[in-house]
Image (cartoon, helix red, strand yellow):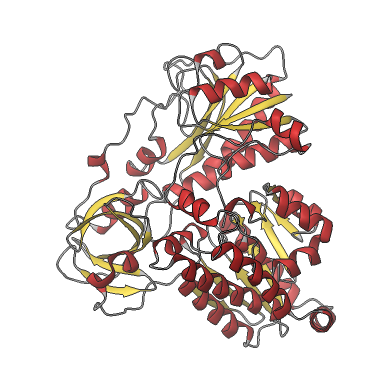
Amino acid sequence: MRILLLCSSFNGLTQRAWLELRRAGHDVSVELAVSQEVMAEAVELAKPDLVICPFLKERVPSRVWRNVRTVIIHPGPPGDRGPSSLDWAIAEAAPEWGVTALQAVEEMDAGPLWGYRMFAMPAGDSSGAPRKSALYNGPVSDAAVELVAEVAVKAADPSFRPAPLDYRSPEVRGRLRRAMRHADREFAWEEPGEDIVRRVRAADGSPGGRAVLCDLPVRVFDVYRGPELAGEPGRVAARREGAVLVHTGDGTVWVGHVRLEREGAVKLPAAMALGELVAGVPERPGYSEITYDRSDGVGVVSFDFYNGAMSTEQCRRLAAALRYAAAQDTRVLVVRGGEVFSNGVHLNVIDAARHPELEAWMNINAINAVCREIVGCTRQLVVTSIGGNAGAGGVMMGLGADRVVVRDAVVLNPHYRTMGLFGSELWTYVLPRRVGAEQALRLTQEALPIGAAEAVELGLADRMLGGSRLEFERRVLEYAERLAVDPSYDRLLAGRRQAREADERRKPLDAYRAEELAEMSRDMFDDRSGFRAARRAFVHKERPVATPAHLARHRELSGASAPAVAGESHM
């Protein structure tokens, strides 16, 4: 079928839907919901058999849904209505939740049902409630992609009729919920830590919990329970790796990120955002974005950076952890990312710096050092564990390993073009080495997402595994343990060393790095491809005033099968 995806942004879920439908053989185009006029024009241009809205905050124009079957993917169980579904699910500790496919009608979220999926709410971590971003990127996205595929199959069946929404039906468990207000997101530090964590995580990563910290109104993100220390609620007790430890009514919480409530402020590591106000606060252990664990044969460096962004300091810490791990007597090193594997350099920190171009330069050099540690590790076999989405330098960072293992739900964006950058992270070495020069050029120039299955087919990844992220990580660890005792281990390790030595003689890694940095200096300092504007638009969440082209025009001009969207940048 000819299918049009209408979306508020070309985010991870929309990308997964696009990839799934294309693999099923459908002709799929994408349009951002910039305005009612643009959405209506997109339908006229694409002439779709079906419109699907996997992530849409705006109302679909009546002239669209009256003329073309239009299905909304709503992040709530049947009968749930309103714009704050996941927020309420977390805030009210719902034991289960769901995703519903429903037909667009005049009244929002009230159309006939095409299908639904229910799932148990994830337990979160030791701090309590799941983060909204983790819920959305995990079970919600998994269920939504299943529903998108189901909707496409049902739309092709002439006998299918969606079921009217009937609140008397036992399967209709939801209800109309109002939008969350500012007051619903406010909290006081005198409250119990568990309540604070739940309030913030119901608003993470947008719009954040609302509080006063160091006498400043702030939005709070990325929180974890801390130790049970007595102290004045709201007082900052300690710092650690950019986070601050804040006293609550019954202990403490670690606050990883905040955004000051003032014009132009962006979300930053809490200690950086608060600056001099916490400069004299002591460092305290108990919070870490990077850990190292080992068994007899396998060492695991785990890192979990908020939203996958890696600042200069984070990269330096990760490079040091990798150096330490590579020097141990283990036989296999697993490099494991978190909820988001990595999206490369930290654009928010760069944009907020006094000299953004200089900070960008320091950041790219620091992440290059991380990549160098992975590529240069020849005392152990290296396995990259990619259980969450990755983009730009984050993809390239993982490619220096002997084995790249991806979770089946992962979306990769192995390109830099949408951010106006040539790219570094030794990509001109690691990417062609895996996929060949022709495919490397295509991936970086087309700037399209690829799914896990396609990544394996291309050779970008070596293996795809399923399951939840925790199940995936367990299976990767089992794979690494088998590799450590494989009878051919010595041959494999010798092959890694020989290949690295031969490649170094042919062209040193420093040469690749120097060539890439020469290009990056023109992008960062001379702004030859619009890096400053693209960075600011991404950091400040600027809505595009128009999309570059509709798919019909794009194909006409370029002959490519790319989605015609101004998609989310990954860097």
Q: Quadrant of the N terminus?
A: top right
Image x and y of residue 71, in percent: 57, 23
Q: Residue at x 46, y 37 (%)?
A: 97
In the rendered image, the vertical position of residue 436 relative to residue 100, given as above or below? below
Q: Is residue 152 above or below residue 447?
A: above
The quadrant of the picture occupied by the C terminus is: bottom right
What residue sits 54% from the left and 56% below the top?
531
Is residue 237 visible from the viewing direction of this image?
no
At horizontal 52% and vertical 60% (from top left) the residue drawn is 308
Residue at image x 62%, y 21%?
43
| Front in this rendered view, residue 76 or 346 | 346
Query: Seen in the image, is 196 located left or right of residue 474?
Result: left
- Above or below, 435 against 236 in this view is above
Can the viewer see residue 281 in this picture?
yes
Q: Position of residue 80 (x, y in %)?
A: 42, 27
Q: Nearer the viewer, residue 479 or 147?
A: 147
**Residue 465 sits in quarter:** bottom right
Residue toward you, 287 or 42: 42
Classify residue 343 as left or right of residue 297: left
Q: Horizontal and vertical percent for residue 107? A: 42, 16
Residue 215 picture quarter: bottom left
Judge from the rendering whether residue 199 lies leftward or rightward of residue 113; answer left or right: left
Residue 6 lies left or right of residue 281; in this view the side is right
Q: Is residue 325 above or below residue 62?
A: below
